[in-house]
């Protein structure tokens, strides 16, 4: 389960990195360029990764026996709010007939997306640490 969460976080982080590069290109539309064709793919992967992320994290706390569980669950409630806010912005961009570099630049600047990314960076660090302290089942 921790690997799934890590993969989801990675998908969102990769999308953000791609969007930074896309925003710098000054494209008027996502039509007619290789990166223009990819921007929707990255955004759709991020949407897929964000749906149910907090619920998956909450299940992992139970499965992995992470303590103090109430602190994790409080963080995941915040993560859920930030993910839902970011999803609303990403889905609005995806609904547009043309995705310009300027539009992506504005999405990148969204405080909601930045809060989400900070949540994911924090979560990633915590999960990596938890993974190191969890005894291996392979002997």
Image (cartoon, rainbow, N blue to C red):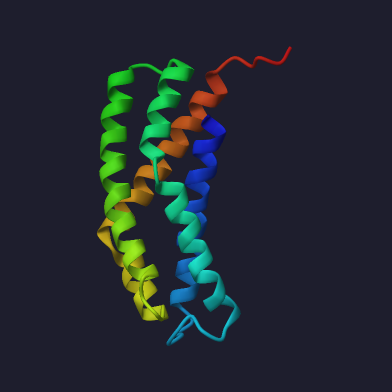
- Residue found at x 35% / y 43%: 119
Horizontal side of 10 relative to 96 (left or right) equals right
- The answer to which of 61 and 55 lies nearer the viewer is 55
- The answer to which of 102 and 91 lies nearer the viewer is 91
Q: Quadrant of residue 126?
A: top left
- Residue found at x 52% / y 30%: 2
In this rendering, the answer to whether 122 lies above or below 41 is above
Determine the residue located farthest toward the right in the rendered image: 139
- The answer to which of 122 and 31 lies nearer the viewer is 31
Q: Quadrant of residue 89?
A: bottom left
In this rendering, the answer to whether 114 lies above or below 105 is above
For the C terminus, the image quarter is top right
Horizontal side of 71 relative to 125 (left or right) equals left
Residue 53 at x, y = what percent?
A: 40, 40
Residue 58 at x, y = what percent?
A: 38, 27
- Residue found at x 33% / y 17%: 68
Determine the residue located farthest toward the top in the rendered image: 139
Q: Quadrant of residue 66?
A: top left
In this rendering, the answer to whether 55 lies above or below 39 is above
In this rendering, the answer to whether 81 lies above or below 17 is above
Horizontal side of 76 relative to 11 (left or right) equals left
Residue 22 at x, y = what percent?
A: 48, 74
């Amino acid at each position: 389960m921790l690997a799934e969460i890590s993969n989801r976080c990675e998908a969102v982080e990769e999308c953000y990195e791609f969007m930074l590069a896309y925003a710098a290109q000054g494209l008027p539309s996502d039509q007619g360029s290789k990166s223009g064709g990819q921007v929707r793919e990255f955004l759709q992967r991020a949407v897929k990764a964000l749906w149910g992320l907090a619920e998956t994290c909450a299940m992992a706390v139970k499965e992995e026996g992470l303590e103090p569980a109430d602190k994790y669950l409080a963080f995941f409630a915040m993560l859920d709010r930030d993910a839902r806010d970011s999803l609303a912005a990403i889905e609005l961009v995806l609904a547009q007939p043309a995705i310009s570099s300027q539009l992506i630049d504005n999405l990148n600047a969204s405080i909601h997306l930045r809060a989400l990314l900070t949540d994911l960076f924090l979560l990633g660090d915590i999960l990596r640490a938890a993974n190191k302290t969890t005894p291996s089942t392979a002997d």
